[in-house]
Image (cartoon, rainbow, N blue to C red):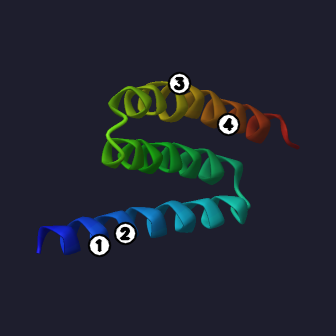
Amino acid sequence: MAAVMSFALDGLLAAALVWVAVWLLFARDLVRAGVLFVVFGLVLALVWVRLSAIDLALAEAAIGAGLLGALVIDAAHQVRRSEP
């Protein structure tokens, strides 16, 4: 039973990762794309945890989703303000 639940969780994480990636590719608003980038990084960090790569999960959550995500969202706000 535990193997089935583990397989289901892995499948759910893989499907969520692909779903967020596709949604990110078709996002028209830059701020929405930035938020989806952060969500993608957090889901990817969960995938790294499932693969027992805790160091990569922490780096992805801190740098990929946290720092880089904040920079992308801030850049999207700057572009939005500079548009006529």
| Sequence-first tag of 2 and 4 | 2
Residue bearing the label numbered 3: 67
Residue at (71% x, 61% y) in the render: 25
Is residue 76 rendered to the left or right of residue 67?
right
Mark 4 packing: few (<14 Cα in 10 Å), some, or many (20+)?
A: some
Residue 79 percent coordinates (x, y) = 78, 37
**Label located before the other in sequence (1 or 4):** 1
SS at badge 4: helix
Label 2 belongs to which residue? 12
Q: Secondary structure at mark 2?
A: helix
Q: Does the residue at mark 2 contact the one at mark 1 (Cβ under 8 Å)? A: yes
Is tag 3's residue or tag 2's residue first in the polypeptide sequence?
2
Tag 2: residue type? Leu
Task: Report the residue at 71% width, 31% height from top.
Answer: 75
Q: Residues within 10 Å of mark 3 (few under 14, many from 20)?
A: few
Location of residue 77 (image quadrant): top right
Q: CA distance from mark 3 to mark 4?
A: 16 Å
Q: Amino acid at mark 3?
A: Leu
Residue position for label 1: 8
Say what amino acid the circle numbered 1 marks. Ala
Could you tell me residue 17's position as x and y percent? 50, 60
Mark 1, Cα crowd under 10 Å, few <14 / some 14-19 / many 20+, is few
User: Foreground residue, 36 or 12?
Assistant: 12
**Separation of marks 2 and 4 at Cα, in angstroms:** 32 Å
Label 1 vs label 4, nearer the camera: 1
